[in-house]
Amino acid sequence: PVRLVPANGEVLHHRLGHNGTAGQWASLHAKCIRPGEWLLAGDTAVVG
């Protein structure tokens, strides 16, 4: 799994609080919805 960590001042949004890929071969999309805010979607999970 890959964990996404926002840069200082950036915010990641996911409706379930997920922050990374769900495992090998998973796909995750990050879309900038406004300056400094990103929406995550795809095959995601909480990655420690």
Image: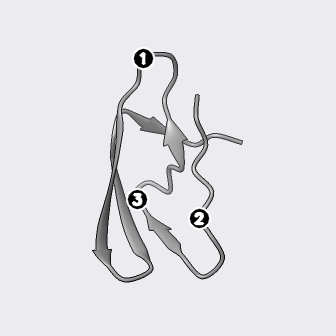
**Which label's residue is closer to the chain start, 1 or 3?**
3
Q: Is residue 39 left or right of residue 3?
A: left
Question: Residue placed at 57% from the left, 50% from the top?
Answer: 4
Residue nearest the observer in this picture, 45 or 33: 33
Residue identified by numbered label 2: 6
User: Between 33 and 48, which is closer to the camera in this rendering?
Assistant: 33
Neighbour tally class for label 3: few under 14, some 14-19, many 20 plus, Cα within 10 Å: some
Q: Residue at x 60, y 82 (%)?
A: 9
- Tell me the amino acid under the disc marked 3: His
Q: Which mark is residue 25?
A: 1
> Which picture quadrant has residue 34?
bottom left
- Looking at the image, is mark 2 or mark 3 earlier in the sequence? 2
Q: Secondary structure at mark 1?
A: loop
Is there CB contact under 8 Å for labels 2 and 1? no
Provide residue 28's location: percent of width, then percent of height: 37, 39
Q: Nearer the viewer, mark 2 or mark 3?
A: 2
Q: Please state, as top left, top right, bottom left or bottom right, where the C terminus lies in the image.
A: top right
Asked which secondary structure carries label 2, the reply is: loop
Q: Amino acid at mark 1?
A: Trp
Judging by the rendered image, the residue that carries numbered circle 3 is 14
Q: How far across and down, in percent of the image, does residue 45 sit? A: 50, 38
Residue lying at the far right in this picture: please name it. 48
